[in-house]
Amino acid sequence: MIKTKKVVLSLLIAMVMLLSAFALMGFTTNVSAYADSKAYFSDEKYTESDFLLCSDGSESYKNIQTFSNEVKSASIGTSIPELTQVIPSQILENSQETVSQYYGKEYGYYVVKEGDYVDVLLLDFEYEFDDGEDSDGLPEKDAADHG
């Protein structure tokens, strides 16, 4: 009887250890798979378009002006998960206090990160060229035409 209890107890301990090992391997596999699948993009890639940058590198349907208006109308302390579609996630993931800035083709940013707090200044660029047209697309009129 005592021999049977020792065998059963040994088998139970072995099964618990085996299941624990499988569970731990499953957790470490998930973490490393997540870390390997994370894509990082350059500052230039983020700012070459007025549209937010999705995690797969494609352009979002939302542009920087819409995003900015949503942030301005949000209450203090509101979570802004789309911030990683506007500025590189490496800046937000950095655990050190940093100041980062980049001015690209369509917009620029200035970021100050202190602990869990992030201050962001976005600058949206609008280009105007003297191409002989008014802002409404019609040819400009000379002062002599107003006679």
Image (tube, helix red, strand yellow):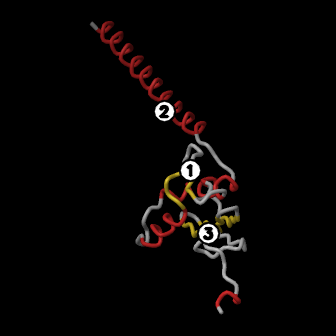
Position of residue 106 relative to residue 24, above or below, is below
Residue visible at 36% across and 9% down in the picture: 7
Q: Amino acid at mark 1?
A: Glu
Q: Is residue 87 left or right of residue 78?
A: right
Residue under label 3: 124
Q: Which mark is residue 59?
A: 1
Quadrant hosting residue 118: bottom right
Q: Which mark is residue 138?
A: none
Sequence-first disc among 1 and 3: 1
The quadrant the C terminus occupies is bottom right
Sequence-first disc among 1 and 2: 2
Residue visible at 65% across and 63% down in the picture: 106
Give the camera-side residue of 51 and 82.
Answer: 51
Position of residue 30 relative to residue 102, above or below, is above
Give the structural element (helix, strand or loop) at label 1.
strand
Give the camera-side residue of 9 and 51.
Answer: 51
Residue at the far bottom: name it: 147
Residue visible at 39% across and 22% down in the picture: 16
Position of residue 38 relative to residue 73, above or below, is above
Q: Amino acid at mark 3?
A: Asp
Q: Amino acid at mark 2?
A: Phe
Q: Position of residue 55 (x, y in %)?
A: 55, 46
Q: Position of residue 81 (x, y in %)?
A: 48, 56
Q: Position of residue 35 (x, y in %)?
A: 58, 39
Q: Is residue 13 left or right of residue 30?
A: left
Residue under label 2: 27
Find the distance from the CA under tag 1 to the CA under tag 2.
33 Å
Residue at the far left: name it: 1
Quadrant hosting residue 5: top left
